[in-house]
Structures are given as C-alpha cells and as structure tokens.
Image (cartoon, grey):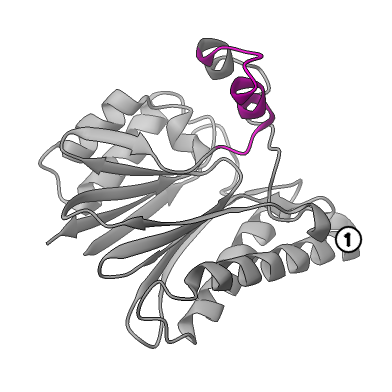
Amino acid sequence: MEIKYGTHKGQKRANNQDYASVFTNLAGYNLAILADGMGGHSGGDVASCMVVEMLGRAWEVTNFDSRLGVEAWFAKNIEEANEKVYAAGQEDDALYGMGSTLVATALFDDVFVIGNVGDSRAYMIADNDMWQITEDHTMVNELLKAGIISENEAANHPSKNMLSRSIGMPPRDLRMDIKTMPNINSGYIMICSDGLTNMVGEPLILEIICDKFSVEEKVIELIEAANAAGGHDNITVMIIKFDR
C-alpha cells in the first residue's frame, strides 16, 4: 500500500483551509484523514486542523489490527471532535460558526472503514472505472434524492455547496456515515476536497489516475488540473494505492 497527498490554496483563495494527514496506530495500521474547513477569518483553518489532529492522535494510541470495534471508535471520536470544534466556535468570537467536512479511512489488510461528514468525497478506482463511495451531505443532494431536481440541475445549482451536515454543528444535530468495505487487489482510493471535484470532471480524474504516473505525480497532476480549470477553491487530494 502506498499513500500520497498534496494540497494547494487554489487560484482564487487567499489561504488554505484544507488539512490532511496520515496517522499510524500501535499495530502499524494507517488512518488517512482529510478535512475542508469553513468559517470567517481563521475559523476554517482552525476547525480542519482540530478535526484531523484530534482524530489522528486518538488513532495513534489504539491497537486495532482488524475492523472489529473500529466503526464504534469512529462514531465516538468523531462525536468528540465535533463537540470540541463546536465549543471552540462558541467560546471565541473570531471562530464563531466555524466548521469542517471530514473524510477518514482506517486501512486494514482486507477491508477499510470509512467515515464522512460533509461534501469532501472518497472514490474507488479500479479496472479503468471509478465510483463515489461517500455521499455528499448537501442541501442540493437532499433535493436530488427526493426527486425534486435532476442531476443536471444539481450539478449547476447555485447552492450546491451548502452543507446539510458538518463537523462543528451542535452535538445533538451531528449525523455521520460510517461503513466498512472490502479492499481491492489492485486499484486506488482517492479522497479529496470539493476544490478538485468542482473543477475537474470524473472522466479527467479517471484518466489521470489510470495514466502511468507515480502516485505522487497523480496527486500533482490532479491539483494542477483543478488550478488550470480556475482553482476557485482550496484543493486537496490523497491517493491510496493497493497492489497485492
């Protein structure tokens, strides 16, 4: 398994509110995390960093060597991170209302456990195909699922990035998706902020990932493609390669 990631503030943003990292637990298994912060001034920076570092440091002291108990661990620790981000936003006027998306995946020999809140995404890529394995927690996606708008209307909706769920909500309101999926023998997981997917279509993403670049070069090429298309937001990409 190989993991590479990169981030860029984009062409239109003054600072980068995305944050990503990889943490290893006591049994040698990795947790890959990406967060896209939101909030005025420094709020988004603080929220995304808090989420990633709190979840990652909690992972480092675990002994998990299989999926057993990991979904419950995710639920507990994401809830705790949400409570702390929400409290910090309430206590400091400069951070009021800050929040963050989250995608985190714990990687084992045969499966991975993934949790997400918000509209940062995870994809599987194998056999020259790609499919989204997380669901966008946005108001527009809720309208799409209810059949109120079409996929074309959703793609071009002016409020398509308005979140229905995020880290930093009042604790009683937090809902998250957590699931376990089988690894693939040869292929990739890609997790990313919406600064990539709002700028680069899935056909080009698939072309770059399936091309004969190294994993690090794939990350760089995807970020450059998003910037070439306008770079309207922060861009963060993490690619996990399976080769067994």
Above or below, 36 relative to 72: above
Q: Eyeballing the image, is 164 above or below 97?
A: above
Q: Position of residue 217 (x, y in %)?
A: 21, 47
- Residue 195 spot, x, y in % from top left: 49, 36
Quadrant hosting residue 76? bottom right
Query: In front: 203, or 141?
Result: 141
Seen at 57% across and 18% down, the residue is 154
In the image, 112 versus 24, the foreground residue is 112
Q: Is residue 211 left or right of residue 56?
A: left
Report if residue 118 is visible in the image. yes
Which secondary structure, mark 1? helix
Q: Residue at x 51, y 37 (%)?
A: 194
In this rendering, the answer to whether 85 lies above or below 227 is below
Where does the C terminus fall, quadrant-wise?
A: bottom left
In which quadrant of the rendered image does the N terminus lie? bottom left
Q: Which residues are magenta?
A: 136-151
Decide whether residue 141 is among the magenta residues. yes
Return the residue at label 1: 90
Q: Amino acid at mark 1?
A: Gln
| In the image: residue 105, left or right of residue 240 | right
Specify whether residue 42 is in view: no
